[in-house]
Amino acid sequence: MYQRLINIDIYWLCGLTFVLAAASCAVVTPLVRRMAFALGVFDEPDGDRRVHSQPTPRLGGLAIFLGFMLALFAMLNVALTNNFVIHHYLGTRDLAHIIGLLFGATLMLGVGLWDDIMGMRPGRKFLSQLIVAAITVILYKFTVFGFTLPHVGYVFLGWLAIPFSIFWYLGMVNAINFLDGLDGLVTGVTLISSVTMVIVSWWHHEYLVAITMCALGGAAAGFLPFNYHPARIFMGDGGALFVGFVLASAAVMGTEKVAVGISLLVPLIVLGVPILDTARVMIARISKRAPLFDADRSHVHHQLLDVGLSQRQVVNLIYIVCGILGAIAIVLSRPGGPHVF
């Protein structure tokens, strides 16, 4: 029966991956929360940038990671023991990509957890991110070698491929990390982004990307009830950096079979709010000669709070905007649609 189920189509495999990730994360999160209490790892309110009112554990990224990994390992086991999956949906190159993804994601989670537990200076944290990104791009070949532009054709990056790919990773992980300022904000945006990328990946036969995004979206869905306002646990830097890394990797994995205009621009559109906000904040800090990675209240979610919106109103508003952007990305990338990518 199990063999027959897997043989139906990719939708079953993706659905099972999503459900397993969600259920695993929902079960593990209370345990991680207890561990955070035992270790004394809390986010203390400060009445300024940190808008929560009570000390809140911040190791939720570990729960997201465990839910994601369990679902992906289960999928990998199916792929390795089922020739139908290998022949129709995944190849040996895809399986190699999974190993690189798991290794790099674990390293990036470790950087964030170290900051959550021990604390890191912004410069050292950025250097650690750079090292993980370089390992992923150079050692595991998560590299964008070129891209296709409308009316131009394929543009080969040449020697710029490696720095471009590293920049992509650094930009994505920091955009997600900067967005993580309100209860449930990054978790919900991750769920919306994952669903969007799953649909686009199905259409373009990028099944590894679809399964990876189902695992990430499922983990976010399982974590959201604990993280939505009032949050009982935060994902912390560990979760934010991990999520950003997986989103960046999924987009790069899609560049081998699909025009990079689709694989990279879909997350850029869906995550337009945090990406544009990060760019705006960085430009402002450079113009003021302020430290680039210091935390402050200059982000869009803090500004919306300052005009009188509640946490839930701000979060729901950004959900709606990301959902609309996701719908636009789906319409533009559907087969036979008005491709702008």
Image: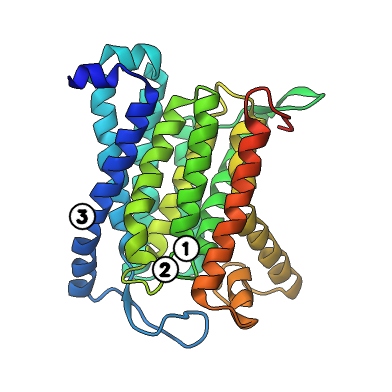
Point out the frontmost of discs 2 and 3. 3
Residue picked out by circle 3: 27
Q: Residue 237's spot in the image, x, y percent?
A: 41, 62
Point out the frontmost of discs 3 and 1. 3
Secondary structure of the residue carrying tag 1 is helix
Amino acid type, residue under disc 3 in the picture:
Val
Q: Quadrant of the N terminus?
A: top left
Q: Residue at x 69, y 71 (%)?
A: 285
Q: Residue 46's spot in the image, x, y percent?
A: 45, 86
Q: Are marks 2 and 1 in contact (CB under 8 Å)?
A: yes
Residue picked out by circle 2: 120
Residue picked out by circle 1: 124
First in sequence, mark 3 or 1: give its number.
3
First in sequence, mark 2 or 3: give its number.
3
Q: Residue at x 59, y 33 (%)?
A: 263
Amino acid type, residue under disc 2 in the picture:
Met
